[in-house]
Image (cartoon, helix red, strand yellow):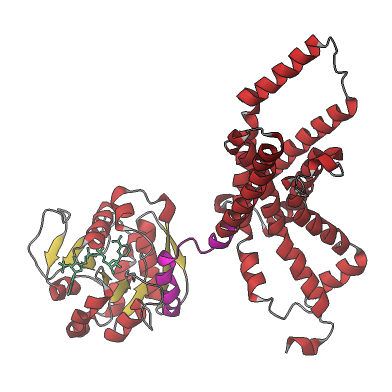
Amino acid sequence: MNKNSSNIMALAPNTSNKRETVCIFGTGDFGRALGHKMIQSGYPIVFGSRSTQKSSLIPNDAEVLSHAEAARKAAIIIIAIQRQHYNFLTPLAEILHGKVLVDISNNLKINQYPESNAEYLAQLVPGAKVVKAFNTVSAWALQSGTLDASRQVFVCGDDMEAKQMVMDIVRALGLTPLDQGSLLAAQEIENYPLQLFPMWKFPILLSLGLTAFFFFYCLTRDIIYPYVYENEDFSFFIAISIPNRICPILALILLALVYLPGVLAAIIQLYRGTKYRRFPDWLDKWMLCRKQLGLVALAFASLHVLYTLVIPIRSFVRWRISSLTVSQALNNKTEPLNNTYAWLSDSYLALGILGFFLFVLLGITSLPSVSNNVNWREFRFVQSKLGYLTLVLCTAHTLVYGGNRFLSPSSYRWYLPNAYMLSLIVPCIVLVVKFVLVFPCLDKPLTQIRQGWERNPKYSE
Ligand code: NAP
């Protein structure tokens, strides 16, 4: 069988129901799990192993042969073996000539070796067509069928036909192949499963830092201050009152931080008069994690909603209402309805409800399954226009909550303003600068710059 004919046979599943035999080197966890799944999908499987004795763990329908014998039976060989053992393949180079070798290996560390495992395999067996695939799928997920989170399989390789054959297998297993290009992409694909929430690091560390800051700030103002000056013990505020103060503050600041880098980028582009110069690294990284910042902000906003829902059943709140009622009864005096306060309170709640509704909408549209179904313009409309509207509503919600307390001296304790006042700084800056940028004298040149116009072309060199 020449190499081309074997490839054509492997493509046969599309035209007939018979699938081509696939060889798997290695009867370890991954080899067995993949073999099992492939047998279920109709592929005859032959294992190449150091021991041809068939253990009870190996799927019944599979054959177990020596590496050389197994390789002769298939055009595609999946190497389910750790990279450090690859040198056993060198003596098999002749048998493997022209075959498609699928490298599925991962490393223990990012960039552990100077070249990717797949490139190393291609160097060891120069006559073979090496394709990288399956390394982001776990043996456990294959075996248990819980592939929902890892349905995408990154595939790369220099030989288009070989890559196509592997992508056909991926599809036949009910997975989604994602062509990542040539074998040069293998290093990145191998690093991918080793990354630990790379885009979430900054948002999570930032929110932890801000939470700690605002926690001690509120502790000082709302618990220590009344204890020192009024001998009142409000330590129970730690359970609900303080978290319910911190959550909306963080939600608002983080939401504003989603839009701040865009505003900074616009100022930088206007100043430079070109879009063809790279932004500083910190700004690039900040822009890349805006979605994660927004989702963390949404999590804090949702917690704020939950904490707010339990306010009426809090013992402290019920005690305050009943003691107010009793004191009014004892004094035979009823407080008249203050229309201004009623308006402020209802507006504050309405702004909060609308802001949270749009916040949730933004979160939903950032989900890949939703964002994949809207076009670029629709996505930009939701994330930019509705995003700014959300920021306006949430900022207004906080401003109205403050009402006329901003200037009242009683709201300052040890000269410290109420924490929500601090939360307004970043959103107000973002909204004011954005408002200024919308003026035609700035918006027009900015639009031109973003369309490729340069004030001073020398700048981009
Ligand atoms: P494993 O359970 O340790 O199995 C590796 C197999 O390699 C062994 O069962 C053995 O098969 C063979 N082998 C061991 N030493 C050898 C040597 N000196 N020469 C030739 N063959 C040797 O490992 P695994 O978890 O299946 O992982 C296999 C590969 O898949 C690795 O590269 C790993 O990075 C990759 N991977 C694994 C997972 C996973 O979830 N486990 C996920 C993605 C990728 P025989 O006894 O039959 O010769």
Q: Which residue is drawn at 38% across and 51% down?
A: 147
x and y percentages locating residue 128 in the rendered image = 29, 81
Is residue 22 on the magenta stretch? Answer: no
Q: Which residue is drawn at 84% across and 43% down?
A: 409
Which image quarter holds the C terminus?
bottom right
- Camera-side residue of 343 and 119: 343
Which image quarter holds the N terminus?
bottom left
Query: In the image, is residue 399 above or below residue 306?
Result: below
- Camera-side residue of 409 and 438: 409
Is residue 192 on the magenta stretch? Answer: yes
The magenta stretch is 182-203
Query: In the image, is residue 46 above or below residue 231?
Result: below
Q: Residue at x 37, y 68 (%)?
A: 133
Query: In the image, is residue 238 above or below residue 65?
Result: above
Q: Residue furthest left?
A: 53
**Predominant SS of the magenta segment:** helix
